[in-house]
Amino acid sequence: MVLLAAGQQRGSTGAAACWVSCQRHVTDRALRAQAYARCMTGGRVDSWLSVIGSQGEDRRVLASARTDPDWRVRWGAVKAEARSRGVTERRVLADWVVDTSPGADLDACLTAARAAAEQGQSTADFLKEAGSRGPAAAARVWARRDAIREALELELYATDESVRPAALAHLGVFLSRSPARVVLEAMAGRPAAGDATVAASLKAVATRRQTSVGQLLLSEARPADEARVNRLFAVYSQELDALRPQLTSADASVRRGALASLRIYGPLARKELEAALGDDDRRARELAARALSDGSGGRVYLARQLQGATTGESARPWLEVLARDKGCAALLHGVASDKARPPAVRGEAVALLGDCPESARDSRKLGSYLSDPSSEVRAGAVRALASMPRSAEGAQAATHALEDPAPEVVAAALDAVADPRQSTHGDDAAELLGSEHPVVRAAAARALERIGRPPHVKALAECLREDPVVAVRVAAAQALANIGGPLAVAALSAAVSHDADTHVQHVSREGLRRLGFTR
């Protein structure tokens, strides 16, 4: 087990790092055995110090641990001594700083600075509770600020990438500066070869703060920083270049993964994120919209985008974000009931109420949109009610909407009734293949793909052969491939040979393949 732990990644905070640290300071075999057990269960680099007291050999171990290169071990030694003496950790820390000679106090001062920063406090505030020697200790630490800064900046460029983010965060707190400012100052006088190292650390801090590197840099950069900011942008641009092929993948899950990775870049990835707002995959659209919103002002930015939306398609990604947020019902109802907005935007908001868990408790309010003068709003209400599981109101609304004079409402109803588990509207859909509105004919064919039966093949075959609209013929071919049968095979074969549109030919050929005809 010792060999297994020692084989873990170097510099990790697990059992291996703990055991290596313990070996540096503990020579007694019995004490090592106890310490190793704590390494295995504690999982931190300083876990072994929990078995160390203040008598005999333990006292020597604590003194040795205060010289460890890892500040966490030094701080762990301070805490172990505080426990054994029955005093506060901060008092022991202040004593260590003050009692150490000025030329040899960097380890003590650096430990104090980092322990304070870990709590998000200045050293002066952290040592206020250290007793009468606290102010003197804080003054000693501040007097060594240049050396502390230099030591932490070296860690920013360390080969062990696990220590860099903490060094950046601690240096920012210690100097009362933003992480971006710390990075930009650390880059001064250093070659561009190390830019990727600090760029990665800034990303780690941005992730921890739930923001983006673009936002951190743009909020901090000044004209004098232009050259260094551009160096960082060059690093991030290379990373974005590596992600771009994934953004155009045919696999939606690959696109989603790439968009999730883009979030950390914020405004730097605006072009890629905005392009993804029109993705066919809902989750991909939502990821892009949320990343843009989070990186540009949150809910205020989202509201501004919605205010400028003039079509349902342009409003959809932002409304999909609202549909997953707390308070979604009130937010979506607010958009849906705003008569100053375009009807298509209002209708999209109503449709997404079906995805908001809070709106399920108030289906009566949702049903009120079924009588709205706007056909887009009525269509949205049909979709929303139908999307609710086991909704009798939704089924009834869809049935009534099949007779609505507006084609978009009828299309929404056809999409709603196409549930093979409970729908009996196959004949209605087949009849609507003869509608004068292409949107209705396409929706009817899509419905028959799910609820069609052999008697409906004739109408679908006629639709595939004669409909002038490509989207309708494509939907009819897909439905025929799903139902199957000799007449469906004949219709698909004819489309492969004679249809003027290559997409219709392709879909028909794939349909034949699914039915077992591979030529």
Image: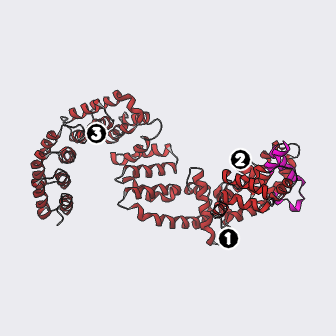
For disc 3, the marked residue is 376
Gap between marks 3 and 1 measured at Cα: 60 Å
For disc 2, the marked residue is 119
Residue 170 % position (x, y)? 70, 54
Above or below 182: residue 452: above
Q: In this view of the protein, which residue sits in the foreground, 339 or 125?
A: 125
Gap between marks 2 and 1 measured at Cα: 30 Å
Q: Which mark is residue 190?
A: 1
* Residue 87 visible within the image: yes
Q: In this view of the protein, which residue sits in the foreground, 142 or 88?
A: 88
Of the image marks 2 and 1, the number of the one nearer the N terminus: 2
Of the image marks 3 and 1, the number of the one nearer the N terminus: 1
Helix, strand or loop at mark 3: helix
Depth check, mark 3 against mark 2: the one in front is: 2
Residue 222 % position (x, y)? 63, 59
* Residue 311 visible within the image: no
* Screen quadrant of the N terminus: bottom right
Left or right of 346? Residue 421 is: left
Q: Is residue 515 magenta?
A: no
Q: Quadrant of residue 409?
A: top left
The type of residue carrying mark 2 is Gln
Q: Please name the residue shown 86% across and 57% down the image.
A: 60
Instruction: Please give the range of residues in magenta.
Output: 78-107
Depth check, mark 2 against mark 1: the one in front is: 2
Q: In which quarter of the image is residue 91?
A: top right
Above or below 196: residue 386: above
Q: Residues within 10 Å of mark 3 (few under 14, many from 20)?
A: many
